[in-house]
Image (cartoon, rainbow, N blue to C red):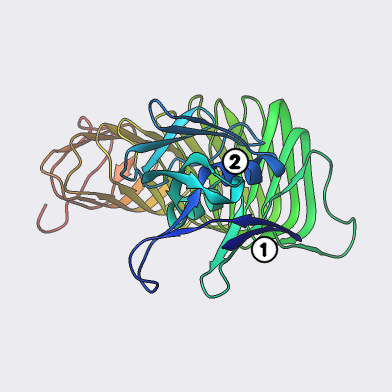
């Protein structure tokens, strides 16, 4: 017998261990999992015919785009989207009564990773056989003191028309899901995990003095993101529709990864690098960038008037990439066999690899040795 502990409450749980006690996998009954999730606002249903577990999160749209695809006969859907497949073992939950009830058992390590991705921090202690959950703090009201700093030791799920978080130290992730035409304002918030922006069309996102190793922008429509001060490790623009505009001032953004096919516009200052990772992606640099990497085919980079790209790198596997250049590219390195066409009134100071140049008289191009 083991226990599932949620905050101060504990739910007894029968655990099924296969193999030796040192290396055996731990399985948990789904009926207990569903009751526990229901108690913290996550609804779920099990369909035995196609072996599918469907979970509905409080935000109604979780950021699970990078979750491992997984293998197994069971499918997991989160907010209507197939997220992963996992091992499912039919069995009997002996904690449910004298004769037990039929259920299925899921591998704890897989479920643990899935819960963490949707906002439920959890740890398994094999010695004491206790699985501890820390539910997310859910709010639709402003959160944080007007002065000083408040520490939050859980993930935060913030939703509603006008989301305001201020003066917080968060030991976990922050997930914000504004209503259509709503807004998000985060001011002096330090996040140990990631900031997930589940943006709706027309939602302005204002981030002032934010510290986070990672920000995911997961938009369903055009969104405007303004960074003012603070430091961000990686800004991921995830696949979406409508485009994203990012403006930065007095901020530090180490890298912007563009996974979207809709246009991504970078303006302002303090970006260290950008990477195009979506086939047919469009990146508009209305700012100077020390480094741009191209990892996807069919992509387009626009260098704005008077802006500079220090180094433009095109990976070997890229099949088609073009540049609309109205500024300066100091060094273009094309490692693919396909020429990079450049057009516009800008200049490429030096190039290595195959490329085509503008018509005579439009811009000068010089080549480094090996071009």
Within 10 Å of the Cα at label 1, are there few (<14), some (14-19), or many (20+) other Cα atoms?
some
The residue tagged 2 is 34
Dot 2 falls on a residue whose secondary structure is helix
- State the separation of the CA atoms marked 2 and 1: 26 Å
Percent across and percent down for residue 125 are 55, 70
Q: Quick one: label 2 or label 1, which is nearer the N terminus?
A: 2
* Picture residue at 44% right of the left edge, 48% below the top: 106
| In this view, the mark in front (2 or 1) | 2
Q: Secondary structure at mark 1?
A: loop
Tag on residue 48? none
Q: Is residue 235 left or right of residue 343?
A: right
Q: How many marks?
A: 2
The reply to whether residue 173 is visible in this rendering is yes
Query: Which image quarter: residue 3?
Result: bottom right
User: Is residue 302 among the parts visible in the rendering?
Assistant: no
**Horizontal arrangement in the rendering, residue 201 relative to residue 140 (left or right):** left
Near-viewer residue (41 or 322)? 41
Residue shown at 27% from the left, 40% from the top: 296
Task: Answer with the quarter of the image where residue 180 lies.
Answer: top right
Instruction: Report whether 184 appears left or right of 231.
Output: right
Q: Residue at x 24, y 33 (%)?
A: 361
Q: Nearer the viewer, residue 250 or 90?
A: 90
Q: Quadrant of residue 44?
A: top right
Residue 145 x/y as whole percent: 88, 56
Horizontal and vertical percent for residue 76?
A: 44, 37
Q: Which mark is residue 171?
A: 1
| Residue located farthest toward the front when viewing the structure as drawn | 98
- Disc 2 crowd rating (10 Å Cα; few below 14, some 14-19, many 20+) is some
| Image point (22%, 49%), residue name | 315
């Amino acid at each position: 017998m083991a226990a599932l502990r949620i905050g101060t409450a504990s739910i007894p749980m029968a655990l099924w261990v296969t193999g030796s006690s040192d290396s055996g996998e731990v399985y948990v009954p789904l009926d207990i999992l569903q009751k526990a999730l229901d108690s913290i606002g996550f609804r779920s249903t099990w369909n035995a015919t196609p072996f599918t577990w469907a979970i509905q999160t409080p935000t109604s749209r979780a950021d699970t785009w990078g979750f491992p695809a997984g293998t197994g006969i069971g499918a997991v859907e989160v907010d209507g989207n197939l997220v992963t497949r996992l091992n499912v073992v039919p069995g009997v939950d002996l904690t449910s009564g004298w004769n037990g009830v039929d259920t299925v058992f899921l591998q704890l390590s897989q479920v643990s990773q899935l819960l963490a991705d949707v906002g439920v921090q959890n740890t398994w202690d094999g010695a004491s056989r206790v699985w501890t959950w820390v539910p997310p703090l859910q709010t639709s009201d402003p959160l944080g003191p007007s002065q000083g700093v408040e520490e939050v030791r859980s993930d935060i799920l913030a939703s509603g028309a006008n989301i305001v978080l201020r003066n917080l130290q968060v030991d976990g992730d922050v997930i914000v899901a504004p209503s259509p035409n709503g807004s998000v304002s985060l001011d002096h918030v330090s996040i140990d995990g990631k900031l997930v922006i589940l943006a709706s069309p027309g939602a302005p996102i204002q981030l002032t003095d934010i510290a986070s190793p990672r920000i995911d922008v997961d938009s369903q429509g055009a969104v405007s993101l303004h960074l003012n001060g603070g430091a961000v490790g990686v800004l991921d623009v995830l696949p979406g529709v409508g485009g994203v505009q990012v403006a930065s001032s007095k901020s530090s953004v180490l890298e912007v990864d563009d996974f979207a096919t809709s246009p991504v516009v970078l303006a302002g200052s303090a970006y260290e690098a950008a990477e195009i990772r979506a086939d047919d992606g469009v990146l508009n640099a209305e700012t100077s960038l020390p480094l741009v990497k191209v990892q996807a085919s069919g992509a387009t980079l626009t260098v704005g008037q008077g802006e500079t790209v220090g180094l433009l790198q095109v990976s070997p596997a890229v099949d088609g990439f073009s540049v609309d250049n109205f500024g300066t590219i100091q060094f273009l390195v094309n490692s693919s066999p396909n020429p990079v066409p450049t057009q516009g009134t800008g200049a490429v100071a030096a190039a290595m690899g195959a490329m085509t140049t503008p018509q005579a008289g439009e811009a000068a191009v010089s080549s480094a040795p090996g071009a």
